[in-house]
Amino acid sequence: MPPAGTAGEWHAVLLDVARASSSVITACGRAWFAFSPAGDQAICADPGASDTSYFAQSFRLIDVATASPIRSINTSVLPRALLWTAGALLLAGLLDTDPNTLAVKDLLNGSSRVVYRLPPPSSSAQSAGYFGHGLAMFSTKFSPDGGRLAFWAAECTALSFDPGYCARTSGVLIVLDLHDGSPRVVASAELYDGSGAGPIAFSNDGAQLAYQIGTGIHVRPLPP
């Protein structure tokens, strides 16, 4: 939140619950916080990155003990999901050169790979806002072990009274196996303006998936 006397300025705060103390991390922006499994490092969006979290392409590794930056990391992947495991710091997102292509990048070693491409839009698809060429991917989430990626893939089928917004979309919820690249559709829905798809969450063991459609919460078992 903006500290007193600095209206309009935002800073990340590192809170030590055990010691009931906090410190400002000026090297962090307003999005994409995650701790390493050991808890000694953290990652966040660069303070100079876009205020819109989906367009942040510069990140900072932070030393938790000193709240100081270790190094900066740049990426061409527009972020949608972030997961720090014992062996990798995974970022899933759309390529900035192709918004219909989903890639996963390890921010620690710099390796990246394309994992999914949206199919061509139908003849009735409408372009609006995030729906470039009538298509979009959103509500992306890694499984706890990093082996799966769940997301909604949707097509805009009707524009709002404001042509910059989509009023109705036809979407499918996909769980992608990142080991063999196989996608599985686990749900489908007609999504309307103000009553769309909400957050996705895996159970801790990755055996179930919870997701929101409108005001309803659904839970589905996933195959091993």
Image (spheres, helix red, strand yellow):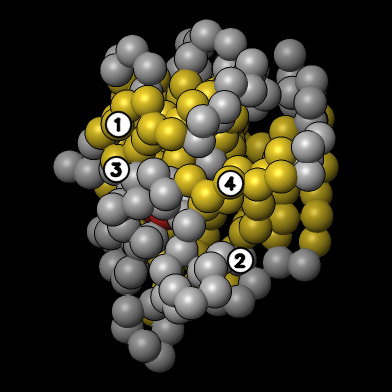
- Quadrant where the N terminus lies? bottom right
Residue 7, percent from left and from top:
45, 78
Q: In this view, does 61 lie above or below 145?
A: below
User: Circle 1 is placed at which residue position?
Assistant: 72
Label 3, label 4: how far apart the Cα atoms are: 25 Å
The location of residue 101, given as percent across then percent down, is 31, 37
Q: Earlier in the sequence, mark 3 or mark 4?
A: 4
Going 33% across and 13% down the picture, which residue do you hit?
A: 109
Q: Residue 83: in sight, yes or no? A: no
According to the picture, the residue beneath numbered tag 4 turns out to be 23
Image check: 219 left or right of 15? right
Secondary-structure class at tag 4: strand
User: Label for residue 57?
Assistant: 3
Q: Which amino acid does label 4 sit on?
A: Ser
Which residue does the image show at 49% across and 27% down from the upper left? 63
| Number of the front mark, 1 or 4 | 4
